[in-house]
Image (cartoon, helix red, strand yellow):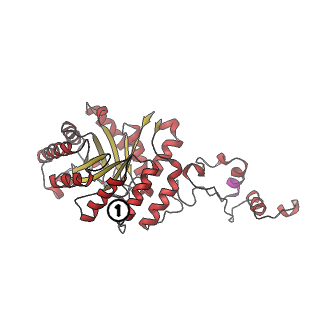
Amino acid sequence: MAYIQFFDTTLRDGEQTPGVNFNQQEKIQIARQLETYGVDVIEAGFPIASDGDFHSVKEIANVIKTATVCGLARSVERDIDRAYEALRDAANAQVHVFLATSDVHMKHKLNMSRPQVLASIKHHVAHARKLFPIVQFSPEDATRTDPAFLVEAVQTAIDAGATVINIPDTVGFTNPTEFGALFRYLRESIPRFDEVIFSTHCHDDLGMSVANALAAIENGARRVEGTVNGIGERAGNTALEEVAVALHIRNDYYKSESGIILNQTKKTSDLISRLSGMPVPRNKAIIGGNAYAHESGIHQDGVLKEPTTYEIITPALVGVEKNSLPLGKLSGRHAFVTRMEELGYTMTDDEEK
Ligand code: KIV
Ligand code: ZN
């Protein structure tokens, strides 16, 4: 049974959601709930980005005791040093260093050549490793990077001391078949693949981020990054609650386990929804208001006879009180009579017809 680490970036990538801003007190409240939820790593922010971010990361580092607290840093010494200042008192700390490796980013954004990018990875990962026991390196825009160059970049980071390699689908471009194949290719090309942790970080531009993350897990990823409710830059990130429940419900297939306390799912989701001001769509998997509601008569009859006819997830598993049988124009007699009984009416056989 493979253990899959959960890396939550609700406070960093999640806060990049247009219109979402958490204040320091809210960030601490969220971090505490994420720890209760059982995530392994909390990406608390980007310490160089602002004094506010720095102080929030520092405060979270002071209060979180079991999860690892992480700060983001560009491949720039002062970013890494600032992350260290913020995280030095954490019980468990890690830094997340990133640099883009796709041609489009190197040419238009960084104005750097491939050899310059490799040299920067080598220098900055080595610098980070002098300060942190756990150093995660992300080749940004990995899924649009020439695969042979991606291997060079990843190998350079590992040789310089990276202990976690995160493969980001920065623009939500890939699909599960391709992303699984990319992990297989990395596994075959990197001799020390099993000595470091490979991680996945997906965006949802084409609506495939959860499927892509699961494809990565099937092909050797041992860490999954994402956010609660899938909030994040543009269309958002992998919804961690969906991955956690998928690994649990389809344990027969994924043969993986995690530290996520599933019955904290609803509470965690509600908190993020309230503090981010982002309502959860009713048809959202796992925690949407309709996820445990059955309206058609045939489904209602089945669920009243045996819930597993139409429910693969018990509401209680994720901390939802109970399922519901809303009465609509397609509902059936069985649900109607059940509701009347709940309301205290006893119906005669004639009335039931
Ligand atoms: O999407 C992305 O590439 C990121 C990196 C910082 C990992 O968020
Ligand atoms: Zn991202």
Query: Where does the magenta region start and end?
Result: 294-300
The quarter of the displayed image where residue 235 is located: bottom left
**Quadrant location of ligand 2?**
bottom left
Give the answer, above or below, for where 342 lies relative to 199. Answer: below
66 and 263: which is toward the camera: 66
In-front residue for pair 34/326 = 34
The quadrant of the rendering that contains the C terminus is: bottom right
* Residue 195, percent from left and from top: 29, 32
- Is residue 163 shown in magenta? no
Does the beta carbon of the residue at mark 1 sit less than 8 Å from ligand 2?
Answer: no
The quadrant holding residue 55 is bottom left
Percent of width and height locating residue 159: 19, 36
User: Residue 299 lies in magenta, yes or no?
Assistant: yes
Q: Judge whether 194 appears above or below 319 on screen.
A: above
Specify whether residue 231 is in view.
Answer: no
Residue displayed at 14% across by 44% down: 123
Quadrant for the N terminus, please: top left
| Image location of residue 327, percent across then percent down | 69, 64
What residue appears at the point 32 percent right and 58 percent down from the top-left corner? 59
Identify residue for label 1: 15
**Relative side of 49 to 122, left or right:** right
Q: Mark 1 is on which residue type?
A: Glu
**90 or 69: nearer the viewer:** 90
**Crowd class of label 1 (few under 14; some 14 to 19; many from 20; radius 10 Å):** some
Q: Point out residue 238 in the picture as x, y percentages from the top left corner.
A: 40, 52
Classify 19 as above or below 89: below
Camera sees residue 141:
yes
Work out which residue is located at the far top of the displayed protein and give it.
Answer: 191
Q: Is residue 124 left or right of residue 254?
A: left
| Residue at point 17%, 58% (across, down) | 108
**Mark 1 element type:** helix
